[in-house]
Image (cartoon, helix red, strand yellow):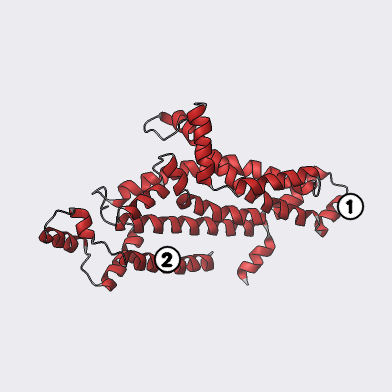
Amino acid sequence: MIRRLALSIVTLVILITIVFLITSVFPDDPGRSLAGPFASQEVVDSINERIGANDPKAEQYFRLVKNTITFDFGDSFQFNQPVSDTLFPALGRSSKLVALGLIMTLPLALMGGIIAARRKDTLLDRGIVTLGLASSSIPEFVSGVALQYVLAVKLGWFEAVAAPNRGFFGELKFLMLPAFAIVIVYFGYIARIARAGTIQALDADYTRTAYMKGLSSRDVIRKHVLRNSLQPTVAVVGTQIGYLFGGLVGLEVIFNYQGLGNLIYNAAREQDYPMLQAGVILVAIIFMICTLIADLVIAWMNPRARLNVRS
């Protein structure tokens, strides 16, 4: 854990440096963006002085590092309020969408991968693999538009765009549609990983020994195969969770859902540097936490992984 945490800190420092360099080369004047095109140069200069845009680059960099440690990125240029007041509510909304998408995707994908592995080279196996390849080749914003048009606009079964203050069940009804788009994209990918891991586990010596001891197929799958076959799937899911928090920009824009990806997209479009920096760094922190948890789960599932961590 200490080694993984140390590596995560190094990765975070590298990411902070990249984010700083990218936002530093933007040609736009932050003071002008805040004051508007018709403001006097004196007003623009005073704003730049207030937000620290005229400070030396080294000082700005270390201020960004300090802001990351304290998670206080100042005020947003767009909303004229602390970044955290907008960022964390957006994180909460994205968490709901990611959680619902995973709840719908993981059981289907794991079941499909295990069934395909147990029926290897049969028509059922080829059907699941082909369906997974076809679905994962469709970008989420394409499937999102198709679902939105058919199920919301034409049939009226779901809400086409997000509406605030709809209550728990109203929000759940809306989130089902973008969650379906997540299922379409990730079912095939996760199912193929689960299939490959299950096939490898079924061919292992310990599985044959379990069958020779007289265990039923259900006990062999539950006690011996799943624990080993799902380790690659855990690693993949850990990385994909981190991606989902910041990578669903297309879906969130299509459904007008004010999540973290949509917030980062608007911050980049409006040159809101504090919000952009905070959003990207927050996604990176989530990504590192998810991959660290996945590593620990794999170590718990496989004692040999614990030995590799110690070596």
Residue that lies at the very extreme toward the top in this rendered image: 156
Q: Position of residue 139 (x, y in %)?
A: 54, 48
**Image quarter in which the C terminus is found:** bottom right
Question: Which structural element holds mark 2?
Answer: helix
Asked where in the image residue 301 lies, by quadrant, the reply is: bottom right
- Taking the spot 47% from the left edge, 50% from the top edge, the residue there is 245
Residue type of the residue flagged with mark 2: Leu
In this orientation, does residue 100 appear?
no
Question: Which structural element holds mark 1?
Answer: helix
Using residue 239 as the reference point, say whether residue 163 is left or right of it.
Answer: left
N-terminal of the pair, mark 2 or mark 1, is: 2
Mark closer to the observer (2, 1): 2
Which residue was labeled with disc 2?
A: 15
Label 1 neighbour load within 10 Å: few <14, some 14-19, many 20+: few
Which residue was labeled with disc 1?
A: 212
Using residue 283 as the reference point, say whether residue 131 is left or right of it.
Answer: right
Q: Position of residue 31 (x, y in %)?
A: 20, 59
Vertical placement of residue 76 versus 6, above or below? above
Relative depth, front residue between 31 and 79: 31
**Image quarter in which the N terminus is found:** bottom right
- Taking the spot 33% from the left edge, 53% from the top edge, the residue there is 269
Residue type of the residue flagged with mark 1: Met
Label 2 neighbour load within 10 Å: few <14, some 14-19, many 20+: some
